[in-house]
Amino acid sequence: MGVSKIHPIRFTLSKALNYIMNPAKTEDGKLLSAFQCTPDAGMAETEFRMTARLAEKMNREKTKFSHSEKKNILAYHMIQSFDMDDNLTPEQVHEIGKEWADEVLGGKFEYVIATHTDTNNLHNHIIFNAVSIEDLSKWHVWNDAKLLRDKNDLVRRRHGLNITQARQNERSKNPKYHQSFRQQIRKSINECIRKSEDFEQFKQHLAEHGVEMKEGKYLSFRVKGQQRFTRDRSLGDKFSRVAIEKRIEKQHAYRNRVAKMARSTKLAATKELANTLLLMRSESIQQFSDFDARMESLQQDILDCRSTMSRLKGKVHQHKQAVQLIRLYNELKPIADQSENKSKAGFQKRRFDKQHEKELQTFETVNAKLKQLGLRTDISDEKLKHVLENKEDEVMQLEVLIDQIAKRAAELAKAKDVVARIEKGEQFVFARDFSKYEQSITQEEKKQQRRKEEREL
């Protein structure tokens, strides 16, 4: 079971950094890493404060680091612990911690990570700056504890580890939290059946999905990372060779049955019915539950695209910040050069530096930030703009892709509703044909009324 925590650091940033970087706890500093800062307690604190001062200078965020302000937050301290049953090495725990930090922070905040090995349970300490290096804004996430837990579960599932205790009870309710080898095999078999016309083609698709199969008295399957084969009988009755062959033979039967049932209903909108049947064919819908499976898969695709788009937007903001830094550097460079050319011990230099104290401090901060970001000061604005435009184009393409996937999901939802109503035998029409249907109903009611009056006479 994995546990994640977070708490703010208001006054003791130096003390906290020195604590997590203790050589006695990190195998003489071997389990230390940093993102956009130096893995040293003193340097990291200085760089955190430089980012805050830069934000203050550029009037992007009011991030004054005054110890007299109780509400001020210098940084945040995250903790990620592991259970002994996870059977991980300190190096693996360290890499998982970096992956978790990147998922939570999205590459927008400087951080230092240290893996401690001085207790029975390996755990990561991550301290990140409260000010973003991307847009110089403060960290602000509603319910950040939930965000940490969700990202921790995501990373642990990715590495085949058990999820947190809070999610254990959800596995029986929501299958997406259960990532056993058997479920992976069942999922791959179901997908391959939908694509196959016969058993030989099924085997080819199964190999493409990375599932190894042995034939004998029983079918046996094995996925990547699995040591032993899993027999078909342990997967369920639907996964034996006979059952798979029958499912392949009957995979088009459901769509034909829906079309046949539609004839017995007052389905006036034949175009919608045709679109539904075509969609069922293109999406390989073989049973009603496949609609939900397809829509869930599309929703996951949307989430993946949004995650990628979020990272790209982070790079876009970083390049925008780089453009601003380089412009500010070029504006202040002449003042810095004049100060450098003055005699170091002369009165004129002291007077000049005092007159331009703010500009020189800002120049030092900007110069240090450019070095931290790994940017050359001689890089042209045009080159940065070109890179920026490419990243923005990628973001736009992802937005178009998300719209397309969302449209497919909406079409599937509509088709699902059509099939559900057909299976119920409902006498229905679509909205655009409702006026025609309403007229026919009104005429039928008038006929019945006339017959009733004639019988009374």
Image (spheres, rainbow, N blue to C red):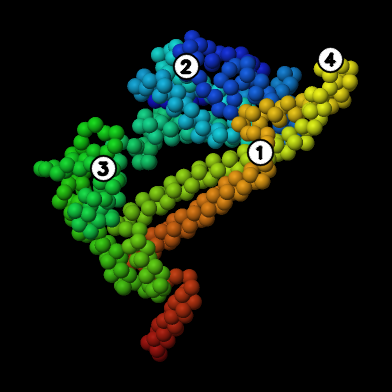
At x 78%, y 36%, the residue is 331
Mark 1 or 3: in front is 1
Q: Are marks 2 and 4 in contact (CB under 8 Å)?
A: no
Mark 2 or 1: in front is 1
Q: Amino acid at mark 3?
A: Val
Instruction: Using the rendered view, name the quadrant where residue 178 is placed.
Output: top left
At x 82%, y 17%, the residue is 344
Instruction: Using the rendered view, name the quadrant where residue 270 is placed.
Output: bottom left
324 relative to 152, above or below: below
Label 1 or label 3, whichever comes before in sequence order: 3
Residue receiving disc 1 = 379
Q: Amino acid at mark 1?
A: Ile
Residue 340 vs residue 430: left or right? Answer: right
- Between the C-alphas of marks 2 and 4, the distance is 44 Å
Q: Secondary structure at mark 1?
A: loop
- Between the C-alphas of marks 1 and 3, the distance is 49 Å
Residue furthest to the top? 24
Q: Amino acid at mark 4?
A: Ala
Counting from the top left corner in percent of width and height, residue 127 is at 57, 23
* Mark 1, other Cα within 10 Å: few <14 / some 14–19 / many ≥20: few
Mark 4 or 3: in front is 4
Residue receiving disc 3 = 211
Front residue (pair 385, 433): 385
Label 2 or label 4, whichever comes before in sequence order: 2
Residue receiving disc 2 = 30
Residue 149 vs residue 455: left or right? Answer: right
Q: Quadrant of the N terminus?
A: top left
Mark 3 or 2: in front is 2
Q: Amino acid at mark 2?
A: Lys
- Between the C-alphas of marks 3 and 2, the distance is 38 Å
